[in-house]
Image (tube, coloured by chain):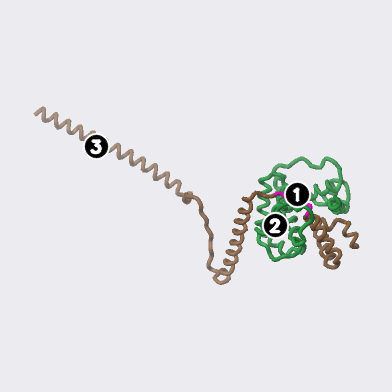
Amino acid sequence: MGTQDLIESGILEAHILGLANQEEQELVKQMVDENQELADYLVDIETDIMRHFNGSAVLPPSKLREIIHLRSRESQQKGKHNFNNKNTQDNRNSTKYLDVEVNDTHIKVHKFWRPAFVAVFILSKIFLITGLYYYFKTVNQDQQIEKLKIEMQQIK
Amino acid sequence: MSELEPQQNGVDRQALTKQGPMTSLEVYDKYGAMAYGIVLQILPQVHLAQEVLVSVFSSPQLQACNSYPFSFAACIIKLARAKAVEAKRKIMAIAPAADSITETDASPQQIFELSFCQGFTPEEVAGKLNISKSEVLRSFHEYFKLYRNA
């Protein structure tokens, strides 16, 4: 394919826009490496395409800059951390680091604790009711004894 | 005039030449508005577009643009489009819309719109408009030629 044919084919534009397939991309790279005229033309197309998209540019809200700053810093730190971990693992294979981030105020327990808590609750109620029953029974018996004592004293 | 604002006439040549590795924020300051415009063309929903824009500039792929064989801007254009089209496909998978091609207008504008903004591959566009793939690619050249001469 000649230079002019390649220019008119639209493959260069498709390549810059990300619409070219692998084969077309390879072709463009190869042709650009070999042909300075084509390389210059590619810069011109890039200029046109950039001017086209700059014409429809929209200023994003300022808050996005801060979000991007935080996200990119996070990913950098993650990358650094992974790199450090890799080094550490190389040195000490037995050591493993686990990052745990908790941002809630609740604790979590195993699900088996649920029946245990229910059993303790039910047993506590049974003991409470039993205790109250025997307490009132004893109080009642004491009152009856007192009553009987008074009656016996009156009879004497 | 800020670099974020649309440039009136011509593009700064320096922007197209190779520079040292740029940080995400430097790239955002330089190309954020252009990328946001591209994303909005593909995804008109503002909140989604903003999410995509954040993902573009916090993406690890952005660092690959430093070693991109062509200009940084071209890499940003590709990345912004790819992310926006990916998000659009996800939305379409959840809520499929009716086929947007109702007319067989094969003008360069229509072909550019279908390929770049709607996310169809040149092969798909060719199939939908009953033209050859080479005609689709040639339309891109025509589209920017018309733009240049306008």
Residue A138 marker: 3
Measured in 3D between alpha carbons, the distance from the residue under mark 1 to the one under mark 2, in whole angstroms, is: 15 Å
Lateral position of residue B139 relative to residue B81, left or right: right
Name the kind of residue labelled 1 in the image: Ser
Residue A90 visible in image: yes
Q: Which of these two is toward me, A85 or A17?
A: A17
Secondary structure beneath label 2:
helix
Lateral position of residue A14 relative to residue A110, left or right: right
What residue sits 63% from the left and 55% below the top? A68
Q: Which of these two is toward me, A53 or B139?
A: A53
* Mark 2 burial class by Cα count in 10 Å: few <14, some 14-19, many 20+: some
Q: Which residues are magenta?
A: A51-58
Look at mark 2 in the image and give the residue it sits on.
B30
Colour of chain A in the rendered structure image: brown
Q: Which of these two is toward me, A83 or A53?
A: A53
Looking at the rendered structure, whether the residues under marks 1 and 2 are on a common chain is answered as: no
Look at mark 1 in the image and give the residue it sits on.
A56
Looking at the rendered structure, whether the residues under marks 3 and 1 are on a common chain is answered as: yes
Secondary structure beneath label 1:
loop
Q: What x and y, as percent, mark residue A45? A: 82, 58
What residue sits 84% from the left and 51% below the top? B147
Secondary structure beneath label 3:
helix
* Mark 1 burial class by Cα count in 10 Å: few <14, some 14-19, many 20+: some
Name the kind of residue labelled 3 in the image: Thr
**Which residue is at the far left?**
A156
